[in-house]
Amino acid sequence: MARVPGKIGYPLIGDESYEFYKDYHAYISKKFEHYGNIFCSRFLNKPTVFIGTHMGVRQLLNSQSNDLEMGYKSFMDHIFSDNILFASDFEAENLRRDLISIFSPQCLENCEEASFATEICQTVFLDLDASTAKETAEAISKLTTSHWHGLISVPVNLRLPGIKQSGYSKAIDAKNQLLKWIKDRLKTSIKGFPLRMKETFDEESAASHLLLFSTSLVPKAISSLICSFLLQATAEENFFEKISDQKVFDAFIKEIYRYYPPILGGRRIAKKDLIIDGYRIPENHSIVYLTHSANRDQMIFENGNTFNYERWLGDKDKPCIFTFGTSRRNCIGIKMVSIILETTCKLLLKEFTWTSNAVNDFQYKPLPISRPVDGYKCRFIPKGTI
């Protein structure tokens, strides 16, 4: 089997994390051009293999062996506490079985009036109605924002007299306050998602998972998809006439998932030597799989770097996309996110048409959640008005 092309580099001096985070698209494009869509480098000071082919990502995510671990615990554990992201495959199977039974459309029955992604997540996961508990909802939102910044901060818990508290330190404080509030919420819950979590898990596990589901990661991902829908709609000719067809609507949403994944990829760690897409990945190497690249692989998707919802119309076999992962470690909230996105988009289509200042090739900030760059605006026009 072939050796993965690229250069690992020496510890610290050979690390390329800064280049990756400074300009993701430039970094990945340069590596792909030089080495192909699978390459190795030193990332987060670890020997790392980047996988950007559809075949490679599919093989990695569909692996049924226990030769991989998730790879998130080492740098996210202090921010989130134990949850399904950090569980072994065996532990995750049990957690998934219980969580999937809780993640149902019925969880959304109380969020019809929630107008933003953050409010929706607070309503669903915390049974917190922002319209009747405004101050509490605002306080929780501020804490989740501080917590979120810990994901993109240098992991140093700095507390020195006269020196501003580090973002990571603020995130740890926010996590502890959120967990305390969530545990208190669980004790008094009599309905909805918190009650079902309380009935299914012990206090620590229930609180840790509610922290994961309700913090900024989920609402930011949902917001990213909604923004992509709004902007791409204005780039399509005769969009508002065509989208009334349910098949076109479904295809358009599917193409949004393919072309604009809110999370660009994920991590694994090789517990032994592996073969992925013809390359040997050595034991203990980190693996970063690139959803964004795999979803646009030209070997699988004709004109993969072009948004074209018509690729999903018709009866021919359709290739899989990896926006929500796949196989036994895929996102457990796929149906819930889909319902939220589709319901929101249909409500907007029912009440408005809109225009934007975006052009066909609008720019995105890829990390930590992919979203349009600042400056794009939509003008909503209520239906029935001129």
Image: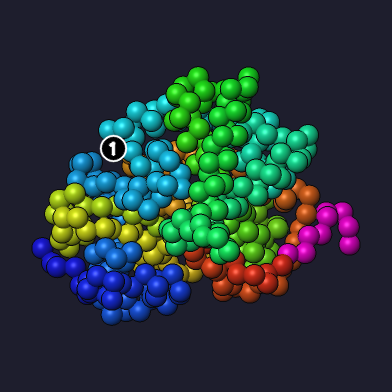
At label 1, the amino acid type is: Asp
Residue 81 shown left or right of residue 274 in the figure: right
Instruction: Indicate yes or no whether the magenta region holds residue 385.
Output: yes
What segment is highlighted magenta in the picture? 378-386
* Residue on which the image places disc 1: 89
Q: Is 220 above or below relative to 82?
A: below
Residue 186 shown left or right of residue 382 in the figure: left
Residue in the image at 55% along x and 69% along y = 364
Camera-nearest residue between 310 and 160: 160
Camera-nearest residue between 218 and 15: 15
Q: Looking at the image, how many numbered discs can be counted on the residues?
A: 1
Question: Can you name the residue that lies furthest to the front here?
Answer: 161
Camera-nearest residue between 129 and 65: 129
Residue 109, position in %: x, y? 66, 30
Residue in the image at 71% along x and 39% along y = 136
Q: Is 99 above or below relative to 134?
A: above
Residue in the image at 38% along x and 30% along y = 95
Residue in the image at 43% along x and 41% along y = 81
